[in-house]
Amino acid sequence: MKKDFTNNDLIAFIGRLANKWGTGHESVNKILDKIHQFLEEKDYDFGFMDKILEFIEMLKAYSRREFHIDDNSLGWIIATLAYLMLPTDLIPDFIPIIGFTDDAAAFIIAYQNISKEIHRFRAWKAAAEEKERKEAGKSKNEQNPVMNVKTEN
């Protein structure tokens, strides 16, 4: 067994573990929903909270097997979310002003490492939403067809 893991090897390993553990299970989606709700209710003053919630969205789509995330990106997302959730980390979160500095740094590093995957997710999500809108419009038209009636003069 290889004992000299690089950081990227470790991150990819976390991603492979998540692959074995986390797709297609309703319990995973429930956990992710609870994390999402927890973060929204806490009303943290992160300038990047929307991006953290996007990480959770990516994991949910991945768990539902709607969107594929490569092992390395999956590892980064999971490791980053775990770090952000820990109240006692490099700089404990309860320290005023600087408590979230390390969290922000961890997030920035992760975001830079998976930026291509994030852009791919956004494109996938936009296409899925567009398809859903078209299908909703189509089914609405099928339910209420416009009748073409000719009138005779």
Image (cartoon, rainbow, N blue to C red):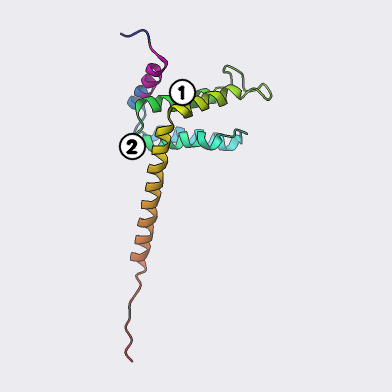
Point out the image quarter for the C terminus: bottom left
How far apart marks 1 and 2 lie (CA) works out to 20 Å
Q: Residue at x 32, y 83 (%)?
A: 150
Determine whether 121 is above or below 102 in the image.
Answer: below
First in sequence: mark 1 vs mark 2:
2
Comparing 35 with 16, the one in front is 16
Badge 1: few (under 14), some or many (20 or more) residues near its Cα, within 10 Å? some
Which residue: 34% across, 40% down?
A: 66
Q: Is residue 11 magenta?
A: yes
Label 1 is placed on what type of residue? Ala
Q: Local crowd at mark 2 within 10 Å, few (<14), some, or many (≥20)?
A: some
Q: Quick check: marks 1 and 2 in contact, CB under 8 Å? A: no
Magenta residues (range):
5-15
Question: What residue is disc 2 on?
Answer: 65
The one of 26 and 7 positioned closer to us in this rendering: 7
Q: Which residue is label 1 attached to?
A: 79
Q: Secondary structure at mark 2?
A: loop
Q: Secondary structure at mark 1?
A: helix
Q: Nearer the viewer, mark 1 or mark 2?
A: 1
Residue placed at 44% from the left, 35% from the top?
30
Could you say where residue 119 lies in the image, as x and y percent from the top left? 42, 37
Q: Quadrant of residue 47?
A: top right
Q: Quadrant of the rendered structure where residue 61 is?
A: top left
- Residue 24 lies left or right of residue 122; in this view the side is left
Residue at the outermost bottom position = 153
